[in-house]
Image: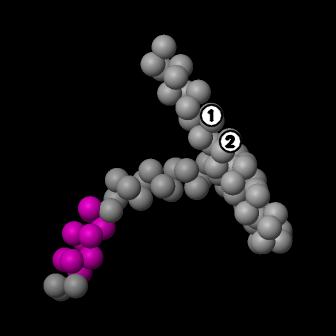
Amino acid sequence: MEAFARLKAWSEAAHPTQGQIEKIFGTSKCSYGLQQMRWRGLVKAVIHIHGTAITYNLRRSLNILAVAA
């Protein structure tokens, strides 16, 4: 029971951060084609992940600037 209480406390503390991270990965998989990662080589996968991160951050910054303006 003590282990369950510790796990629940940790889960509640990690929940907000986990939600933000899962949103990014979900968007990357659905919108930018990261579901096919296992069929690429390591070099191509790294390039694709970096390109996806750059694209995601550019789109996010445009949305943030649009709201601020």
Label 1 SS: helix
Q: Is residue 4 left or right of residue 19?
A: left
The reply to whether discs 1 and 2 touch (Cβ–Cβ < 8 Å) is: yes
Cα distance in 3D space between marks 1 and 2? 6 Å
| Residue assigned mark 1 | 59
Asked if residue 64 is among those painted magenta in the image, a careful observer would answer no
Residue stretch in magenta: 4-13
The colour scheme applied to this rendered structure is one colour
Residue 41 at x, y percent in the picture: 83, 71
Q: Is residue 14 left or right of residue 39?
A: left
Q: In terms of depth relative to the viewer, which is nearer, 19 or 65?
A: 65
Residue 4 at x, y percent in the picture: 23, 80
**Dot 1, crowdedness within 10 Å: few (<14), some or many (≥20)?**
few
Label 2 SS: helix
**Dot 2, crowdedness within 10 Å: few (<14), some or many (≥20)?**
some
Image position of 26 with respect to 37: above or below: above
Q: Is residue 41 left or right of residue 64?
A: right
Residue 14 at x, y percent in the picture: 32, 62
In the current view of this chain or complex, which residue is farthest to the left?
Answer: 2
Residue at image coords 70%, 57%:
49
Q: Is residue 30 visible?
A: no
Q: Is residue 33 visible?
A: yes
Q: Amino acid at mark 1?
A: Arg
Residue at image coords 55%, 27%:
63
In the current view of this chain or complex, which residue is farthest to the top?
Answer: 69
| Residue assigned mark 2 | 55
State which quarter of the image contains the N terminus. bottom left
State whether the magenta stretch is mostly helix, strand or loop: helix
Q: Is residue 22 left or right of residue 10?
A: right
Q: Amino acid at mark 2?
A: Thr
